[in-house]
Image: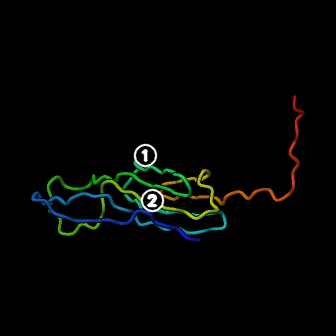
Amino acid sequence: MAVTKVSSTTHFFQHHGSGEPATGRWTPNTDIYVTETGLVIKAELAGMKSDSLEITVEEGQRLRINGIRPDCCRAPKCSFLVMEISYGPFETVLDLPAGYDLSRAKAIYMNGFLRVDVPPAQKPQSKATKVPITEGV
């Protein structure tokens, strides 16, 4: 089973003359694991509200998580000595393995973590069934 993380972390820190760091798209830390009930995707997204997040199922087995993390605790005028927390727009795009039903995925955001549970795809019925035949005109 393979998972491909399509987007990569691109975090740059560049000062402009104002002492403000440049902003860029960032990628949250993400765990992906399998349980007895399916696949779990867990993203670390502290300091956000659920209405700032968007999860999109794209063609195939691709899942896109994006949003904007605001920096609402910073003093209006400051000069960073260290900046390790990413703010602004983010995105992570995951190509998930076959065998999971993204159309039945459920998500919850709690305590700074977004958790997406994806159940296994339903197996086709293995027992034989009869197909009804209607009389043609």
Instruction: Please tell me whether mark 1 or mark 2 is closer to you in this view.
Output: 2
- Place of residue 63 in the rendered image (x, y in percent of width and height, measured from the top left): 50, 56
- Alpha-carbon span between mark 1 and mark 2: 19 Å
Q: Residues within 10 Å of mark 1 (few under 14, many from 20)?
A: few
Q: Amino acid at mark 2?
A: Val
Q: Amino acid at mark 1?
A: Asp
Residue for badge 1: 51
Q: Which of marks 2 and 1 precedes in the sequence? A: 1
Question: Is residue 10 positioned above or below 134 on the image?
Answer: below
Q: Residue furthest left?
A: 17
Residue for badge 2: 93
- Place of residue 85 in the rendered image (x, y in percent of width and height, measured from the top left): 30, 64
Residue under the image location 34 percent in, 61 percent down: 26
- Place of residue 88 in the rendered image (x, y in percent of width and height, measured from the top left): 30, 54
Q: Nearer the viewer, residue 100 or 54?
A: 100
- Place of residue 80 in the rendered image (x, y in percent of width and height, measured from the top left): 17, 64
Residue under the image location 67 percent in, 58 percent down: 121
Which quadrant of the figure has residue 98?
A: bottom right
Quarter in which the N terminus is drawn: bottom right
Q: Residue furthest front?
A: 137
